Amino acid sequence: MAKQIKVSLIGNPNTGKTSVFNLLTGLNQQVGNYPGITVEKKEGVCKLPRGVKAHILDLPGTYSLNASSLDENVVVEILLNSKDKDYPDVAVVVSDIENLKRNLLLFTQIKDLGIPTILAINMADRMQRRGISLDIPLLESQLHTKIALISARKNQGIDLLKELIYDYKKLSVTPCVDALSFAPEYFDRLKKVFPTQSIYKLWLVITQDVNFRKVDKKIADIKPDFELKSDSELKRYQQKETIKRYQFINKALDEGMQVDQSAATGLRERLDRVLTHKVWGYVIFFAILLVIFQAIYDWASYPMDWIDEGFAWLSETVKQVLPAGPFVDLITDGIIPGLGGVVIFIPQIAFLFFFISILEESGYMSRVVFLMDRVMRRFGLSGKSVVPLISGTACAIPAVMATRNIESWKERLITILVVPFTTCSARLPVYLIIIALVIPDKTLGGIFGYQSLVLMALYFLGFITAVGAAWILHKLLKMPNKTYFVIEMPGYKMPLFKNVAINVFEKTKSFIVDAGKIILAISIILWALASFGPTDQFTDAEEIVAQANPELSGEALDQKIASHKLEYSFIGYAGKAIAPIVAPLGYDWKIGIGVITSFAAREVFVGTLATIYSVGSDEEETIKNRMAAEINPTTGAPLFNFATGISLLLFYAFAMQCVSTLAIVKRETNGWKWPIIQLVSMSVLAYVAALIAYQLL
């Protein structure tokens, strides 16, 4: 079979490029990073006609090839380097029927690179409602390409797009506009210096702001007498190039596109007036959040109970079926409870990603960013910082990466430093188990539960703390700061079920797989530390406990022996060593172990407690019941009371409990200075807040 056709999907943000990618690849896709940089790379496989396969690469969204951010530079680097393994055989430029004029700027630039290029005009189902009609043959003739009129929403035109990709060798590579004719002398001299190079590729290399300046020096080395242009002159040339392109685009669309303004509806404008209102906009946003958190609790409670009981049953079944021994103990007391402590939270995490996907797909998230810009300005940030802060509710790692679109270094650094305060999905398992233990399962006014209100309060606490920390950093950091806030408002649309489903599946799978690796390793280590001890108090536990408690027998005696063994195991000694540090916060040595191990990842806390409490316990009990039954040896009262619960919630709300986030911050800030400052300051804040809360309560 012939090699796969390499296809690059390229387009402006909000053109439906991801929807097209999902339709072409389905679940045959994977997400990673480009080598050496923190830019997300999405690729997948698509079946074309006659059994041919295509490798589809979804490039980051870009408005043009005049790169001004790391995301856009990735696109330019790949398209300029024909030896790059991701260099496409054919480029598919995805455009939006409602913003075709702006989208065609990028299309004409890619055509100039000599790459076979297909124009996919998306959202064709809106043409009638917007009063738009296109003369496809005329536009194909003027743009020197083939056009696929598609609707990702209704799955229309995708078969035609696949046919065009299959026949990509028949596409014209002739540029559709002579965009560099404004300075013939300069480009003629450039051609003489590099006679074998594409002039337009060379022009892009010269005008890149960051990564490609060395080529300018190469020109000077080869031809010392060659006239180098200043940055201001180069920018003027770029402006003239853009004007040339838009003159061509305007002429092409005047002839090939008709718009009947009387047919266009004004629903979008009416919705915007309400959803971005300076009062009602915030009320609606907070109401939506409250409904989301209530749904996370109510909808997920049933599958959570089934999963919890299922893992307890599995552990007990394995213990009964397999012969007793250390290996079976490892499985039933270490691996199964540890993994069960994370798998149980799949329903909540899936629902969280589900609602975030709905907000993004519908176009509402852009309105939230615009709305919050008014608030963020007062704290030294802009609406662009809201994107990472909202992304942080899923995971701090991609949220830190999302700051790349912020041009101001000061604003970007502040956003990176405060993003971990937002409540990520890794905190969700900790919050849910502690809230379930210490907050009554009652409702306010018969509608909203106290538990969902507390969860929402924790999300708001994280956001308010992030904004407050940003204000302090804005005052403390003496750096030049100049920023502009520009955001595109996409049209409202019904979310595509396939996009939402794929997003939920991929994000949840990533969360579970990544967390599962850490938790499995830590669960095995914790089981070993809890199952062996260094002294006779551990090895002779049965005899010692039986002599000290002659009145006990059966299950009561077994539990007493298990408790004694745990206390004198390796993990028991480690826990007691840190007990004086965590005791003022209301924690015993077991919680202390959970806090320490969760530095690998926040969600490990629940898996750690599941592993510790499962050693010698009744396997029919769930982790929640075992934690609820834990007794404070000093007071004789339940250990997980209201004061301890609030202390733990506040500790995890403020603590920097994630090694992966630290690593990403180090990479994004090019050093250990800022991540160390971040770790120390957040840890101190978490300890002090938890201490005050416990002592007051």
Image (cartoon, grey):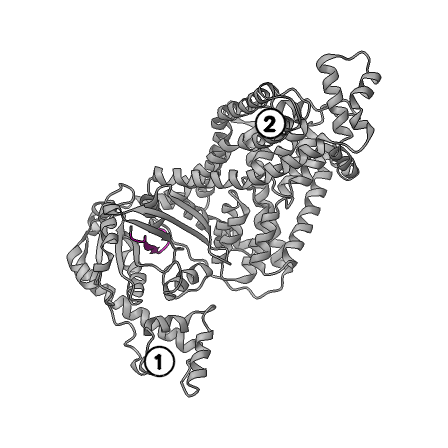
Is 476 magenta? The answer is no
Residue 10 lies in the magenta-colored region: yes
Foreground residue among 251 and 404:
404
Please, what is the three-letter code of the amino acid marked with disc 1?
Leu
- Amino acid type, residue under disc 2 in the picture: Ala
Residue 523 in the image: state x and y as whole percent.
Answer: 63, 35
Q: Residues within 10 Å of mark 1 (few under 14, many from 20)?
A: some
Residue under label 1: 190
Q: Is residue 20 visible?
A: yes
Q: Is residue 621 above or below residue 420?
A: above
Question: What range of the chain is rendered magenta?
Answer: 2-15
Q: Which residue extends farthest right?
A: 548
Q: Which mark is residue 654?
A: none
> Label 1 near label 2: C-beta < 8 Å?
no
Quarter of the C terminus within the rendering: top right
The picture places residue 608, in percent across and down from the top left corner, at 64, 34
- Vertical comparison of 553 with 392: above or below: above
Is the residue 180 above or below the residue 488 in the image?
Answer: below
Lateral position of residue 116 relative to residue 139, left or right: right
159 relative position to 435: left or right: left
Give the residue displayed 60% in from the left and 42% down from the top: 601
Residue bearing mark 2: 436
Q: Quadrant of residue 473?
A: bottom right
Question: Residue 13 versus residue 551: which sits nearer the camera?
Answer: 551
Mark 1: secondary structure:
helix
Indicate whether 238 appears above or below 694: below
Q: CA distance from mark 2 to mark 1?
A: 70 Å
Residue 284 visible to the viewer = no
Q: How many marks?
A: 2
